[in-house]
Image: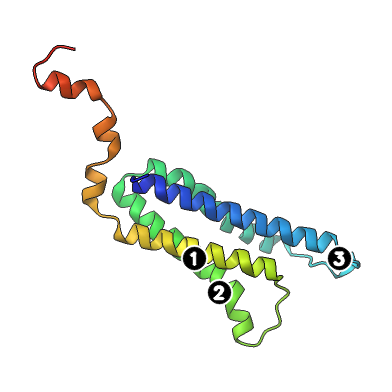
């Protein structure tokens, strides 16, 4: 897979699946706890914020495939940076400043993978050159019969 659009889309899908499974794992821990009254109860604005946060990788899977080079590159850099900073900040900063966090070891494991993955997305988008976008495999493979016609040989 040499097409950067495909690679970025795949990285977003990988990150999204890690986000979802980490959340499922956390839900199993909450539901399986002996005292459900201790389970966190989030206000509606927190649920909305987390929904918006999860929509970013969902939308980027499609955006990577459909956006033209410049918009694609910029969207991946911005979305990747936002997701990396939010995920990394919420997961790794509180323990560093001495705050007690309810993060499970499994959640920290997933958060590390997610943060590395979205950092790779930013790096891939940052180093993505316009030359590669101009010589996309879609343009080479898109109409193989055209090359034969261009040489004057009938198909």
Front of the two marks 2 and 3: 3
Give residue 77's position: percent from left, percent from top: 39, 60
Mark closer to the chain start, 2 or 3: 3
Q: How many dots with numbers?
A: 3
Nearer-the-camera pick, 152 or 24: 152
* Picture quadrant of residue 78: bottom left
Q: Residues within 10 Å of mark 1 (few under 14, many from 20)?
A: some
Q: Which label number is shown at residue 33?
A: 3
Nearer-the-camera pick, 114 or 52: 114
The answer to whether residue 155 is above or below residue 81 is above
Tell me the SS state at disc 1: helix
Front of the two marks 2 and 1: 1
Tell me the SS state at disc 3: loop
Q: Which label number is shown at residue 116?
A: 1
The answer to whether residue 93 is above or below residue 78 is below
Give residue 95's position: percent from left, percent from top: 63, 82
Mark closer to the chain start, 3 or 1: 3
Which residue is at 28% across, 29% downward? 142
In the figure, is residue 120 to the left or right of 57? Answer: left
Mark closer to the chain start, 2 or 1: 2
Which residue is at 67% across, 84% downward? 99
Q: Label 2 to label 3, Cα distance in Å?
A: 26 Å
In the figure, is residue 32 to the left or right of 94? Answer: right
Q: Label 3 to label 1, Cα distance in Å?
A: 30 Å
* Picture quadrant of residue 49: bottom right
Give residue 17's position: percent from left, percent from top: 59, 52
In the figure, is residue 115 to the left or right of 26? Answer: left
Tell me the SS state at disc 2: helix
Which residue is at 30% across, 55% downward? 128
Give residue 90's position: percent from left, percent from top: 60, 72
Q: Label 2 to label 1, Cα distance in Å?
A: 13 Å
The residue singled out by tag 2 in the image is 89
């Amino acid at each position: 897979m040499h097409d950067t659009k495909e690679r970025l889309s795949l990285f977003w899908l990988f990150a999204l699946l890690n986000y979802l499974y980490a959340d499922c794992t956390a839900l199993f821990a909450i539901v399986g706890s002996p005292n459900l009254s201790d389970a966190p109860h989030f206000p509606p604005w927190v649920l909305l914020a987390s929904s918006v946060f999860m929509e970013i990788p969902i939308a980027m899977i499609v955006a990577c495939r459909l956006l033209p080079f410049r918009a694609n590159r910029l969207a991946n850099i911005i979305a990747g940076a936002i997701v990396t900073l939010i995920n990394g900040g919420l997961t790794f900063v509180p323990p560093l400043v001495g705050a007690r966090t309810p993060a499970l070891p499994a959640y920290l494991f997933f958060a590390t993978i997610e943060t590395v993955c979205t950092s790779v997305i930013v790096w891939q988008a940052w180093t993505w050159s316009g030359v590669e976008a101009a010589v996309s495999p879609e343009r080479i493979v898109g109409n193989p019969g055209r090359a034969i016609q261009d040489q004057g040989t009938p198909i």
